[in-house]
Image (spheres, rainbow, N blue to C red):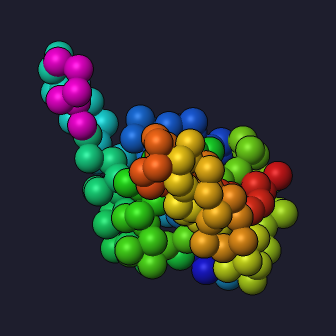
């Protein structure tokens, strides 16, 4: 199984996926490590002077395709945006949220056979004030107003 991490120094997990210097891909079967430079860092300088709201880097669109080309099965980060989650799932990559900062400590505790049950972020649909029931036995806290639908995230387990 191939597990990817956003990282700045190949030892710790970066706080922001789009601003990470690169991605470390670890094959848990062979312990092989591959480092990919983040192609979005070149665009950061280009969009820095654009007005607010027009600075989209396309992280949620570009990174999942990049990871799919490398055969990644699981992507571990400290936080995900909604677009990133949807695009990762479309590419067949499982997103996992962790509080762990060090990659090696995460890999020591990581059990790949439990990914389908414990570490996946799920979406929930909400009504009214965004309170609703998530698809996979979780409560979704959405962004709905009134009686509209809200989209929320639910994480059954955070890897420690």
Say which residue appears at 38% left-offset and 74% top-offset. Answer: 90
Q: Is residue 115 left or right of residue 105?
A: left
**114 or 30: nearer the eye?**
114
Q: Position of residue 35 (x, y in %)?
A: 47, 56
Q: Position of residue 53 (x, y in %)?
A: 22, 27
Prevailing secondary structure of the magenta residues = loop
Q: Is residue 112 above or below residue 105?
A: below
- What number of labels is visible? 0
Residue 78: in magenta span: no
What quarter of the picture does the N terminus occupy? bottom right
Q: Is residue 17 above or below residue 138?
A: above
Say which residue appears at 62% left-offset and 57% top-offset. Answer: 132
Numbered range of the magenta stretch: 51-56
Say which residue appears at 44% left-offset and 55% top-offset. Answer: 149
**152 or 20: nearer the eye?**
152
- Residue 45: image quadrant is top left
Question: Would you say residue 47 is visible in this rendering?
Answer: yes
Q: Position of residue 138 (x, y in %)?
A: 71, 64
Residue 54: in magenta span: yes
**2 or 147: nearer the eye?**
147
Say which residue appears at 79% left-offset and 74% top-offset. Answer: 111
Q: Position of residue 92 (x, y in %)?
A: 45, 78
- Residue 91: image quadrant is bottom left
Question: Would you say residue 48 is visible in this rendering?
Answer: no
The outermost residue toward the front is 147
């Amino acid at each position: 199984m191939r597990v990817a991490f956003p990282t700045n120094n190949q030892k710790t997990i970066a706080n922001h996926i789009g601003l990470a210097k690169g991605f470390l891909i670890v094959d848990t079967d062979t312990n092989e490590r591959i480092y990919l430079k983040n192609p979005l860092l070149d665009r950061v300088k280009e969009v820095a002077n654009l007005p607010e709201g027009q600075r989209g880097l396309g992280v949620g669109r570009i990174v999942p395709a990049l990871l799919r080309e490398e055969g990644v099965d699981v992507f571990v980060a400290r936080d995900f945006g909604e677009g990133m989650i949807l695009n990762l799932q479309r590419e067949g990559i499982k997103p996992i949220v962790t509080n762990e900062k060090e990659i090696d400590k995460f890999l020591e505790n990581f059990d790949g056979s439990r990914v389908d049950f414990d570490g996946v972020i799920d979406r929930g649909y909400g009504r009214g004030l965004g309170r609703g029931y998530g698809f996979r036995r979780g409560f979704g806290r959405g962004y709905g107003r009134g009686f509209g639908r809200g989209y929320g995230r639910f994480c059954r387990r955070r890897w420690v």
